[in-house]
Amino acid sequence: MLLSTLRAFARREPVLLISLVCAVISMFFCPPSAAYLGYIDTRVLILLFCLMAVVAGMQKYGVFDLLAQKLLSGRHALRTIVLFLTLLPFFASMLITNDVALITFVPFAILVLGLVGQQALLLPVIVLQTVSANLGSIATPVGNPQNLFLYASYDLSAGQFFGTVLPFALASLVGIIALALCRKSCTLHVCFAEPKYITDGRRVMLCTALFILCLLTVFHVLPDVALLVLTCAALVLFDRDIFRRIDYGLLLTFVCFFLFAGNIGSLPNVRSCLQQIVGSSPLLASLAASQIISNVPAAVLLHGFTENWQALLLGVDIGGLGTPIASLASLISFRFYTHTPEAKTGRYLAWFTLVNVCGLVFLLALAALLSYL
């Protein structure tokens, strides 16, 4: 019974389990002490909590379903439908994070392609959606957890952040559009059985207001504690159910990696080794680490060993491409695909690897070119 429960937990929360194991192992080298409190970045946790609450509310009240349906209803060329399905997570991930964008739009793509009898396109479309969400999310501080963490940790300005990531986001957009349009086309009619509506307009307005407060906090206009108080008060007064929809596993994952990174960083020999590795090439070191432990924990682990935030930021963002675990969001879409009829897991992984490696090489070449210039 216990073994089956642990297996279920490992399948459901693989990264949380890994982070927990890492934190526990590190405690044998650095026993628990008051220093642990200094390892945990409460600002990042508050921002993540509040953003997840806002996104959960938007999902609950049908905002994303309505948007997607409005964009795709009617007669469209197949090429246009594929482009829509691919770009939806690209732009949505900038505001609602890459994992939430895939949770929202991969099932939607499965539904739409099923309605128009194009199930054969499920594999390439879901792969493109995954890459699209991972690359679109690099464009904003709130697009993914590692951006939010590094933005807060290095106390970056909006100009510093956007000046670094926007060339890569724009280049990614061009490449994704080219891949999405690279296919034969025909005209199809998309008709949904049930029209979608916003279920509670007033609460959507409340979520919008809270999202604006989140952005003000990200850009250091509003204190993080004030944001937390306002968000919790709004949820208690207007919709306590949203508390249940928040991904506390992600928050706990961050806490575990904060502890792991803090403990490892306090060991003189390990610290010296990491400083040498990261110091030689922060971009390549963070990119390589992302392939093994995923880009969020890579950012948490390595940020204390370099002041070159540009290289670290680009390394963990570009490092979201590559292996399926390089970005946790990739596992979400892979799981959705494996539950579709006639899923071909091996072929999916081959497509995924090919597109990701091509994207990785392309963006690394762009980084090298911009560095040279």
Image (cartoon, helix red, strand yellow):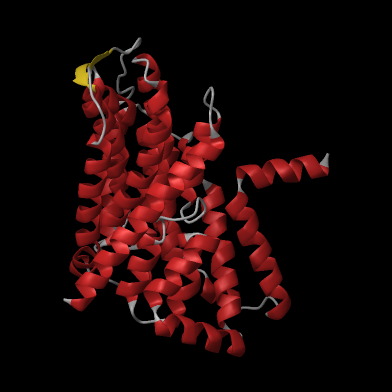
| Quadrant in which the N terminus appears | top right
- Tell me: 79 left or right of 102: left
Q: Is residue 75 above or below residue 242?
A: above
Q: Quadrant of residue 84?
A: top left
Residue for point 21% across, 63% down: 162
Q: Nearer the viewer, residue 333 or 16?
A: 333
Q: Residue furthest right?
A: 1
How many numbered tags mark residues here? 0
| Quadrant in which the C terminus appears | bottom left
Q: Is residue 87 above or below residue 145?
A: above
Q: Quadrant of residue 147?
A: bottom left
Q: Is residue 68 above or below residue 24?
A: above
- Residue 247 location (% of width, % of height): 51, 45
Q: Quadrant of residue 185?
A: top left
Q: Nearer the viewer, residue 1 or 170?
A: 170
- Tell me: 105 left or right of 74: right
Residue for point 34% across, 61% down: 361
- Residue 231 location (% of width, % of height): 38, 47
Q: Residue furthest top?
A: 193
Residue 104 seen in this snapshot: no
Residue for point 78% across, 40% down: 4
Q: Nearer the viewer, residue 210 or 357?
A: 357
- Tell me: 298 left or right of 356: right
Q: Nearer the viewer, residue 205 or 137?
A: 137
Residue for point 52% across, 76% down: 38
Residue 61 seen in this snapshot: yes
- Residue 265 location (% of width, % of height): 55, 81
- Residue 318 location (% of width, % of height): 36, 61
